[in-house]
C-alpha cells in the first residue's frame, strides 16, 4: 500500500522554526520527485517546494525562498521541509506529494497543521 505520512506540524510563534517530515512507504522512493504543498483556511492548495529524485535540484515558490529548505533522505524514504522565520501567513495544512516520472502529483499525504501565531 502506497502511503505518505506527514509529521512535525504544530503551533509556533512568528519568527520561529519547524521541521516537517514525510515518510513514504509502498513505493520506490528514489524514483519520485517529492513536493510540499499547503492549504490555508479559505484558500486553495498551493505549491511550496519540490526536490528532484536525487535531491540535487530544488525549487521554491517565491514567498518561501530563503526561509524554507526542502531535503530528502533516500535511505530513510523521507522528505523534509525545514521552515525558518515563520510568518502568520505560513499558517496552513502542509501536504507532501509524490510525482513519478513526470506523471503529476498523484500520491498525497493527509497533511499536518502548522500554525504560526503573530
Image (tube, rainbow, N blue to C red):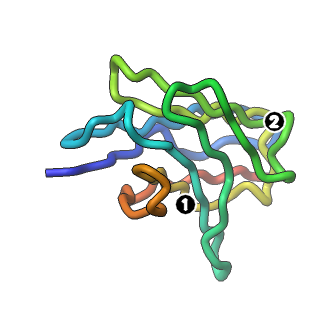
Q: Earlier in the sequence, mark 2 or mark 1?
A: 2
Is residue 24 toward the left or the right of residue 46 in the image?
left
Distance from the alpha carbon under mark 2 to that under mark 1: 18 Å
Residue 109 location, x and y as percent? Answer: 37, 56
**Local crowd at mark 1 within 10 Å, few (<14), some, or many (≥20)?**
some
Vertical placement of residue 89 versus 5, above or below: below
Is residue 101 toward the left or the right of residue 86 in the image?
left
Residue 55 sits in which quadrant?
Answer: top right
Q: Residue 116 carries which label?
A: none
Residue at position x 60%, y 46% from top? 11
Vertical placement of residue 89 versus 62, above or below: below
Residue 98 in view of the camera: no
Residue 37 location, x and y as percent? Answer: 59, 57
Q: Name the residue under label 1.
A: 93
Q: Residue 67 carries which label?
A: 2
Vertical placement of residue 63 versus 14, above or below: below
Residue 84 sits in which quadrant?
Answer: top right
Residue nearest the observer in this picture, 5 or 1: 1
Asked if labels 1 and 2 touch by Cβ distance under 8 angstroms, the answer is no
Is residue 83 toward the left or the right of residue 66 in the image?
left
- Total marks shown come to 2
Q: Residue furthest top?
A: 75
Residue at position x 34%, y 21% from top? 76
Residue 107 location, x and y as percent? Answer: 36, 58
What secondary structure is found at the residue carrying circle 2?
loop
State which mark lies toward you, 2 or 1: 2
Residue nearest the observer in this picture, 65 or 118: 65
**Local crowd at mark 2 within 10 Å, few (<14), some, or many (≥20)?**
few
Residue at position x 43%, y 50% from top? 101
Amino acid at each position: 500500500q502506497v502511503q505518505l505520512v506527514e509529521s512535525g506540524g504544530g503551533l509556533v510563534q512568528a519568527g520561529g522554526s519547524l521541521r516537517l517530515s514525510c515518510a513514504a512507504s509502498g513505493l520506490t522512493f528514489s524514483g519520485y520527485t517529492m513536493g510540499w504543498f499547503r492549504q490555508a483556511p479559505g484558500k486553495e492548495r498551493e505549491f511550496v517546494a519540490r526536490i528532484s529524485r536525487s535531491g540535487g535540484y530544488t525549487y521554491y515558490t517565491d514567498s518561501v525562498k530563503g526561509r524554507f529548505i526542502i531535503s530528502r533522505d533516500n535511505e530513510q524514504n523521507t522528505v523534509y521541509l525545514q521552515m525558518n522565520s515563520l510568518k502568520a501567513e505560513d499558517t496552513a495544512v502542509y501536504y507532501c506529494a509524490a510525482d513519478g516520472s513526470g506523471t503529476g502529483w498523484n500520491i498525497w499525504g493527509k497533511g499536518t497543521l502548522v500554525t504560526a501565531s503573530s
